Amino acid sequence: MSANRSRSARRLARTLASTGAVALGACLLAPAPALAAQSAEVLQDFEAWNSNHGGQWRLVADEQQAFVRCLWGGAAQFGATPQSNAEFFALARTALDATRTLHGVDGSTLVDDSVLLLPLALAGSNDKVRVRLRQVLGGLEVESSFVNLLFARDGALLSIDSQALPNARELAAPSARLDGESARALARAEFERVAGGAPSWVGAEREFVKPVVRDGQRVAVRAWAVSANSEREGAAHVAFEFHLDASSGEVLERRSLVHDFDVSGTVRTLATPGALPDVASNLPTSQALPHVEVTSAAGNVVTDANGNFNIIGASAPLQVTVKYLGPWCNSRNNDGTNYGITTTLNAASGNQVLLNPSAVTATTAQANVHLWVSRVHDWLKGINPADTAPDFQARSNANLAGACNAYYSVSPPPPSINFFTAGTIPGLSCVNMAYSSVVAHELGHWLNDQYSSGNGSNGIGEGLADTYAMYLLDTPIVGEDFCGSGCHVRTGLNTRQFCGDGNPGCHGEVHRDGEVLMGALWKVRARLETSLGASAGALAADALFSAWLNGYDDTSITTLIEVHYLTLDDDDGNISNGTPNYLAIDGGFRDQGFPGVQASLCGNFVSYCTSSTTTGNCVPTMNFSGTPSATATSGCVLSVASVDGQRTGLIFYGVSGRVAFPWSTGSTSWFCVKSPVQRTFVQSSGGSAGACNGNLSVDWNQFRATYPGALGGSIAPGTKVQTQAWFRDPPAAKTTNLSNAMEFTVCP
Ligand SMILES: [Zn+2]
């Protein structure tokens, strides 16, 4: 970020703060100076929206547009309770029109995508409905340009989260136009430049619209996507998708299509039990095989989640064939010798078919992949049966030559997840990588694409892939014992810190960057297990994770993820009184270095203005305890410590804002409360003369309640109050001096 941008960002953050809107981390508006006026209009419209819809709304600004990314925190009713998906889409469009000036998105550029119930009653909140629309310009899909609206079951709007391009109506005609063949040639050349060798395969080009940041603003660019890869015996698998500007041919983005598991684990046969790999101390056991096809002359059926099947209308004896193949997984052996068994069922019921009976290592790997792909699928469907994102057949390859790795690849098609056999690389001896958490992680990358979070270069893909594994296995360890006992890949207990919304990918490597997110989400889960009990806490964590995957389409690790979590968790359309699981969610994110989200818009004491150093060398400092209230008759003590002893003084306050003007020539003393000001009681600082042990204090709630005619006596909740202390200091130029100042917001 340039100095220019951060200066104007700070300016806007101040504008936001001064209007009472909450600026979260680096949720910045309008980097370009020309947009400042527009931002002020947006803020005005936000104020109008907020006061017309309950006063609890907040906004998160879009970093590259003078518009709102996320409007949240309150509840707004637009009409009757919707009864059908069509009515929810209609309601979504009404809500979008009503907030058009905030998010700036033209509804005619959006097409209906999907409606999904989020079963948040599982988390102790209430069920919600997510309506998603996506942007299409000139007949082309706009990359990652979704608008997600969250509604209560009765149709109250709870949030609008827009990643669509504002003010976009149609695509500008390109000045020049690259054809598909030229795009492929450019991709081939770029691959050669980056990979140091020609690709062995270049895919078909796909035209789309890519939002690109130019001069600090996100604009629509017509683009080509072309994939290329090289896959040669003994060489590393390299695959990229190139995004090329369809006018200039400029390479807009290069995405690796190989999402490594990093350095990883172990594997062997029948099927390996638990979280550990297939090693001598954890030999294969007989486990039910869900979701595989049982084929026969009398018809084909698929086993259920417990491995049961029933071929209707058949009679014994009947020959059947079973492979590690079903609707959710095609688990293959990399050398093409895919395991299968053909056997005769002799009875009408009670037949047993055992695959991999002698626990052959390479077959165990195939079995493990099938089992864990099935378990991830069943886990997600168990949380939300209406969620269709997990419903796809994952193609997998086990026992790849090489060692200590696993990867998800989307190029060349079809996509696949791939696992190396046991072996060594320099300095590391690894298990067969086809086991539990490694399978869940690689399938997780695929699910990231299904849920539109993707596997971008900022680490969100790795963080989420780990989260599927941790949550499903209910353990923070990913890739347990992959390189020997106690040698793991990653853990949710890591302390790697979030470096700010404006600093994505700050740890310089996708897995390390991902640790920030997987660490936070593990800590949210651990806190929920503490606050709700292990079982209910785990279920709440799963429900929130599933709802977030479906409710929003975050593509990078920012504070917005916590905002989205809190919006999903809220149960009364009022964020200012917190959410059922606020402490666990906010605490989990803060554990990992996220700034957290204030649930309360009141209180919020902040210190400003530096204190004077008195002629007695004291530095009086303001403090507080309790909650400032518009109605309570006590319970908010403002105090000033380290005042010179035995001095007369008082605490005063105002409601007109901050100022800072010098109190006496040459002194470091500042008067910081804009007039008019209200004095409270004159009092003695106590303590001893000549020491800095004096103290002044007043219960602000009591003063306000006792003197309703005083300034702020009938003060409205939400009002900002500035306060400071004034006391005698006879040798000083004005014979008095001042403390630092504090500002706070009055609660109801
Ligand atoms: Zn990965």
Image (cartoon, grey):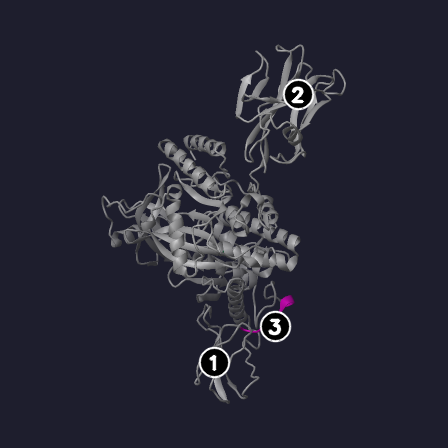
**Label 1: how many residues lie within 10 Å, few (<14), some (14-19) or many (20+)?**
some
The residue identified by callout 1 is 321
The residue identified by callout 2 is 650
Q: How many marks?
A: 3
Which corner quadrant holds the N terminus? top left
Queried whether the magenta region covers residue 281, the answer comes back as yes
Which corner quadrant holds the C terminus? top right
Task: Evaluate whether residue 619 shows in this view.
Answer: no
User: Tag 3, which secondary structure?
Assistant: loop
Queried whether the magenta region covers residue 123, the answer comes back as no
Image: magenta residue range: 280-289
**Nearest to the observer: residue 205 or residue 381:** 381
The residue identified by callout 3 is 285
**Nearest to the observer: residue 417 or residue 475:** 475
Measured along the vertical axis of the image, is residue 501 above or below residue 455? above
User: Tag 2, which secondary structure?
Assistant: strand
